Image (cartoon, grey):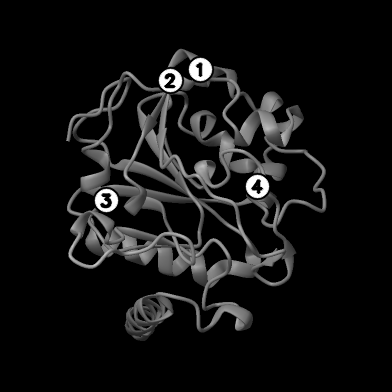
Protein backbone atom coordinates (compact mmCIF):
# COMPACT_ATOMS: atom_id res chain seq x y z
CA UNK A 1 0.00 0.00 0.00
CA UNK A 2 1.60 3.26 -1.10
CA UNK A 3 -0.12 6.39 0.13
CA UNK A 4 1.77 9.63 -0.31
CA UNK A 5 1.18 13.22 0.80
CA UNK A 6 2.37 12.83 4.36
CA UNK A 7 1.38 9.22 5.05
CA UNK A 8 3.64 6.19 4.94
CA UNK A 9 3.31 2.50 4.26
CA UNK A 10 3.55 1.75 7.97
CA UNK A 11 0.65 3.92 9.10
CA UNK A 12 -2.87 2.49 9.29
CA UNK A 13 -5.35 3.77 6.72
CA UNK A 14 -7.57 6.32 8.45
CA UNK A 15 -11.31 5.89 8.25
CA UNK A 16 -13.74 8.38 9.79
CA UNK A 17 -17.29 7.12 10.24
CA UNK A 18 -20.26 9.44 10.68
CA UNK A 19 -21.82 8.81 14.09
CA UNK A 20 -25.33 9.49 15.34
CA UNK A 21 -26.50 8.32 18.80
CA UNK A 22 -29.71 6.95 17.23
CA UNK A 23 -27.60 4.71 15.01
CA UNK A 24 -24.94 3.47 17.41
CA UNK A 25 -25.55 -0.14 16.39
CA UNK A 26 -25.22 0.77 12.71
CA UNK A 27 -21.83 2.34 13.47
CA UNK A 28 -20.65 -0.71 15.41
CA UNK A 29 -21.70 -3.10 12.63
CA UNK A 30 -20.14 -0.89 9.92
CA UNK A 31 -16.88 -0.80 11.89
CA UNK A 32 -16.98 -4.57 12.42
CA UNK A 33 -17.59 -5.21 8.71
CA UNK A 34 -14.51 -3.16 7.76
CA UNK A 35 -12.05 -4.49 10.34
CA UNK A 36 -13.10 -8.12 9.89
CA UNK A 37 -12.33 -8.11 6.16
CA UNK A 38 -9.38 -5.73 6.00
CA UNK A 39 -5.98 -7.14 5.08
CA UNK A 40 -4.29 -3.82 5.86
CA UNK A 41 -4.12 -1.95 9.18
CA UNK A 42 -6.96 0.54 9.59
CA UNK A 43 -7.66 3.22 12.17
CA UNK A 44 -11.41 3.80 12.52
CA UNK A 45 -12.66 6.93 14.28
CA UNK A 46 -16.31 7.91 14.80
CA UNK A 47 -17.06 11.57 14.04
CA UNK A 48 -19.12 12.47 17.13
CA UNK A 49 -20.71 15.91 16.96
CA UNK A 50 -20.82 16.45 20.75
CA UNK A 51 -17.06 15.81 20.97
CA UNK A 52 -16.37 18.28 18.16
CA UNK A 53 -18.52 20.90 19.89
CA UNK A 54 -16.68 20.35 23.17
CA UNK A 55 -13.37 20.92 21.34
CA UNK A 56 -14.67 24.10 19.70
CA UNK A 57 -14.39 22.62 16.20
CA UNK A 58 -18.12 22.65 15.48
CA UNK A 59 -20.73 25.23 16.44
CA UNK A 60 -23.18 25.13 13.53
CA UNK A 61 -26.87 25.21 14.48
CA UNK A 62 -28.77 22.15 13.32
CA UNK A 63 -31.55 22.69 10.78
CA UNK A 64 -34.57 20.54 9.94
CA UNK A 65 -33.03 19.16 6.74
CA UNK A 66 -30.13 17.46 8.56
CA UNK A 67 -31.21 13.83 8.88
CA UNK A 68 -28.11 12.88 10.90
CA UNK A 69 -25.64 14.52 13.28
CA UNK A 70 -22.86 14.10 10.70
CA UNK A 71 -24.53 15.93 7.80
CA UNK A 72 -21.83 18.62 7.96
CA UNK A 73 -19.20 17.30 10.39
CA UNK A 74 -18.08 14.83 7.68
CA UNK A 75 -16.29 17.69 5.91
CA UNK A 76 -13.90 18.05 8.84
CA UNK A 77 -12.13 14.86 7.70
CA UNK A 78 -9.09 16.66 6.17
CA UNK A 79 -8.76 18.86 9.28
CA UNK A 80 -9.01 15.84 11.60
CA UNK A 81 -6.22 14.28 9.51
CA UNK A 82 -3.98 17.34 9.95
CA UNK A 83 -4.23 17.88 6.18
CA UNK A 84 -1.87 14.97 5.57
CA UNK A 85 -2.12 11.76 3.57
CA UNK A 86 -5.30 10.04 2.47
CA UNK A 87 -8.31 9.31 4.66
CA UNK A 88 -11.83 8.11 4.07
CA UNK A 89 -15.14 9.36 5.37
CA UNK A 90 -18.13 7.03 5.29
CA UNK A 91 -21.68 7.19 6.65
CA UNK A 92 -22.45 4.70 9.42
CA UNK A 93 -25.22 3.04 7.38
CA UNK A 94 -22.74 1.06 5.26
CA UNK A 95 -21.99 -2.66 5.35
CA UNK A 96 -18.61 -3.60 3.87
CA UNK A 97 -18.50 -6.92 2.05
CA UNK A 98 -14.97 -6.69 0.61
CA UNK A 99 -11.42 -5.94 1.75
CA UNK A 100 -10.91 -2.18 2.15
CA UNK A 101 -7.45 -2.67 0.57
CA UNK A 102 -9.21 -3.07 -2.80
CA UNK A 103 -10.60 0.45 -2.38
CA UNK A 104 -7.31 1.90 -1.14
CA UNK A 105 -5.58 0.43 -4.21
CA UNK A 106 -7.78 2.69 -6.40
CA UNK A 107 -6.34 5.85 -4.84
CA UNK A 108 -4.77 8.25 -7.35
CA UNK A 109 -2.79 11.23 -6.01
CA UNK A 110 -3.81 13.44 -8.92
CA UNK A 111 -7.28 13.86 -7.39
CA UNK A 112 -8.33 15.97 -4.41
CA UNK A 113 -11.11 13.53 -3.58
CA UNK A 114 -12.47 10.28 -5.01
CA UNK A 115 -16.03 8.98 -4.65
CA UNK A 116 -18.86 7.12 -6.37
CA UNK A 117 -20.45 9.66 -8.71
CA UNK A 118 -24.09 8.62 -8.40
CA UNK A 119 -26.91 9.83 -10.60
CA UNK A 120 -29.54 9.36 -7.93
CA UNK A 121 -32.97 10.84 -7.27
CA UNK A 122 -34.76 9.18 -4.33
CA UNK A 123 -38.41 8.24 -4.78
CA UNK A 124 -39.29 8.32 -1.07
CA UNK A 125 -40.39 11.49 0.76
CA UNK A 126 -38.94 10.24 4.06
CA UNK A 127 -36.10 7.97 5.16
CA UNK A 128 -34.68 6.32 8.28
CA UNK A 129 -37.04 7.04 11.19
CA UNK A 130 -39.18 9.60 9.34
CA UNK A 131 -36.49 12.15 8.42
CA UNK A 132 -37.18 14.32 5.38
CA UNK A 133 -35.62 12.95 2.18
CA UNK A 134 -33.96 15.86 0.38
CA UNK A 135 -33.10 15.95 -3.33
CA UNK A 136 -30.09 17.84 -4.66
CA UNK A 137 -27.36 17.51 -7.34
CA UNK A 138 -24.58 15.02 -6.55
CA UNK A 139 -26.73 13.41 -3.88
CA UNK A 140 -24.89 10.65 -2.01
CA UNK A 141 -21.51 11.62 -3.48
CA UNK A 142 -20.44 12.83 -0.02
CA UNK A 143 -21.62 9.67 1.79
CA UNK A 144 -18.32 7.90 1.11
CA UNK A 145 -15.32 9.98 0.12
CA UNK A 146 -11.61 9.28 -0.17
CA UNK A 147 -9.92 12.56 0.79
CA UNK A 148 -6.45 13.51 -0.39
CA UNK A 149 -6.01 15.49 2.82
CA UNK A 150 -2.65 16.93 1.75
CA UNK A 151 -4.10 18.41 -1.46
CA UNK A 152 -3.89 22.21 -1.48
CA UNK A 153 -7.60 22.60 -2.31
CA UNK A 154 -8.66 20.54 0.72
CA UNK A 155 -6.84 22.95 3.00
CA UNK A 156 -9.80 25.23 2.27
CA UNK A 157 -11.94 22.91 4.42
CA UNK A 158 -11.16 24.66 7.69
CA UNK A 159 -13.51 24.34 10.68
CA UNK A 160 -14.66 27.90 9.95
CA UNK A 161 -15.66 26.98 6.39
CA UNK A 162 -17.42 23.79 7.52
CA UNK A 163 -19.34 25.78 10.14
CA UNK A 164 -20.43 28.60 7.85
CA UNK A 165 -20.67 27.43 4.24
CA UNK A 166 -23.94 26.27 2.67
CA UNK A 167 -24.98 22.66 2.31
CA UNK A 168 -24.78 23.10 -1.47
CA UNK A 169 -21.16 24.31 -1.30
CA UNK A 170 -20.11 21.37 0.84
CA UNK A 171 -22.15 18.43 -0.43
CA UNK A 172 -21.56 19.36 -4.08
CA UNK A 173 -17.81 19.81 -3.51
CA UNK A 174 -17.91 23.37 -4.82
CA UNK A 175 -14.42 24.11 -3.48
CA UNK A 176 -13.14 21.80 -6.25
CA UNK A 177 -13.04 21.77 -10.03
CA UNK A 178 -14.81 18.79 -11.64
CA UNK A 179 -11.51 17.32 -12.89
CA UNK A 180 -10.22 17.23 -9.30
CA UNK A 181 -12.91 14.69 -8.35
CA UNK A 182 -11.94 11.10 -9.13
CA UNK A 183 -14.48 8.34 -9.75
CA UNK A 184 -14.84 5.07 -7.82
CA UNK A 185 -16.92 2.08 -9.07
CA UNK A 186 -20.50 2.23 -7.77
CA UNK A 187 -20.16 -1.13 -6.01
CA UNK A 188 -18.24 0.68 -3.25
CA UNK A 189 -21.34 2.76 -2.46
CA UNK A 190 -24.08 0.43 -3.63
CA UNK A 191 -27.36 2.20 -2.90
CA UNK A 192 -29.90 -0.24 -1.49
CA UNK A 193 -33.18 0.18 -3.35
CA UNK A 194 -31.53 1.97 -6.28
CA UNK A 195 -28.52 0.09 -7.65
CA UNK A 196 -29.10 -3.40 -9.02
CA UNK A 197 -27.06 -6.58 -9.24
CA UNK A 198 -27.03 -7.86 -12.84
CA UNK A 199 -26.94 -11.65 -13.00
CA UNK A 200 -23.67 -12.93 -14.42
CA UNK A 201 -21.93 -9.54 -14.11
CA UNK A 202 -19.53 -9.64 -11.17
CA UNK A 203 -18.80 -5.92 -11.64
CA UNK A 204 -22.30 -5.15 -10.27
CA UNK A 205 -22.00 -7.17 -7.03
CA UNK A 206 -21.78 -4.78 -4.05
CA UNK A 207 -18.51 -4.42 -2.15
CA UNK A 208 -20.21 -2.02 0.27
CA UNK A 209 -23.99 -1.77 0.69
CA UNK A 210 -25.31 1.68 1.61
CA UNK A 211 -28.69 1.55 3.36
CA UNK A 212 -29.33 5.15 2.42
CA UNK A 213 -33.13 4.97 2.79
CA UNK A 214 -32.85 3.29 6.20
CA UNK A 215 -31.40 0.01 7.42
CA UNK A 216 -32.72 -2.97 9.40
CA UNK A 217 -31.89 -1.21 12.68
CA UNK A 218 -35.00 0.91 11.97
CA UNK A 219 -38.33 -0.90 12.36
CA UNK A 220 -39.67 0.61 9.12
CA UNK A 221 -36.74 -0.81 7.11
CA UNK A 222 -36.29 -4.23 8.71
CA UNK A 223 -37.26 -5.97 5.45
CA UNK A 224 -35.14 -3.86 3.07
CA UNK A 225 -32.92 -5.43 0.43
CA UNK A 226 -29.72 -6.97 1.88
CA UNK A 227 -31.26 -6.84 5.38
CA UNK A 228 -30.19 -10.46 5.91
CA UNK A 229 -26.52 -9.58 5.33
CA UNK A 230 -26.63 -6.74 7.84
CA UNK A 231 -28.48 -8.81 10.45
CA UNK A 232 -25.96 -11.63 10.07
CA UNK A 233 -23.10 -9.15 10.60
CA UNK A 234 -24.89 -7.72 13.63
CA UNK A 235 -25.27 -11.18 15.18
CA UNK A 236 -21.56 -11.83 14.68
CA UNK A 237 -20.66 -8.46 16.22
CA UNK A 238 -22.93 -9.14 19.23
CA UNK A 239 -21.38 -12.59 19.80
CA UNK A 240 -17.84 -11.16 19.72
CA UNK A 241 -18.88 -8.33 22.04
CA UNK A 242 -20.35 -10.78 24.58
CA UNK A 243 -17.23 -12.94 24.38
CA UNK A 244 -15.00 -9.90 25.11
CA UNK A 245 -17.23 -8.78 27.98
CA UNK A 246 -17.08 -12.28 29.43
CA UNK A 247 -13.29 -12.31 29.56
Kindly report which numbered mark, 2 or 4, lies closer to the viewer in this rendering: 2
- Would you say the residues marked 2 and 4 are in contact, meaning their CB atoms lie under 8 Å apart? no
For disc 4, the marked residue is: 71
Kindly report which numbered mark, 1 or 3, lies closer to the viewer in this rendering: 1
Q: Is residue 52 above or below residue 66?
A: above
Asked whether 140 or 90 is in front, the reply is: 140
Is 2 on the left-hand or right-hand side of 183? left
- Would you say the residues marked 1 and 2 are in contact, meaning their CB atoms lie under 8 Å apart? yes
Q: Quadrant of residue 84?
A: top left
Of marks 2 and 4, which one's residue comes earlier in the chain?
A: 4
Local SS, label 1: loop
Is 246 on the left-hand or right-hand side of 102? right
Q: What label sits on residue 205 in the rendered view?
A: none
Q: Is residue 4 above or below residue 37?
A: above
Percent position of residue 164, x then y: 76, 28
Q: What label sits on residue 180 in the rendered view?
A: 2
Of marks 4 and 1, which one's residue comes earlier in the chain?
A: 4
Percent position of residue 75, x then y: 58, 35
The Cα–Cα distance between marks 1 and 2, rounded to whole angstroms, is 5 Å
For disc 3, the marked residue is: 100
For disc 1, the marked residue is: 177
Q: Quadrant of residue 3?
A: top left
Amino acid sequence: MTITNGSTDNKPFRIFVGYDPREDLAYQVCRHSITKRSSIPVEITPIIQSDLRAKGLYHRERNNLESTEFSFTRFLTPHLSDYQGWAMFVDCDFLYLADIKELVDLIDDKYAIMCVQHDYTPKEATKMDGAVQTVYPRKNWSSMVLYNCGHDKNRLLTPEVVNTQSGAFLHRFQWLEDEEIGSVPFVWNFLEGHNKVVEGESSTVPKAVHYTRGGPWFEAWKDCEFADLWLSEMEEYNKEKKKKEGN
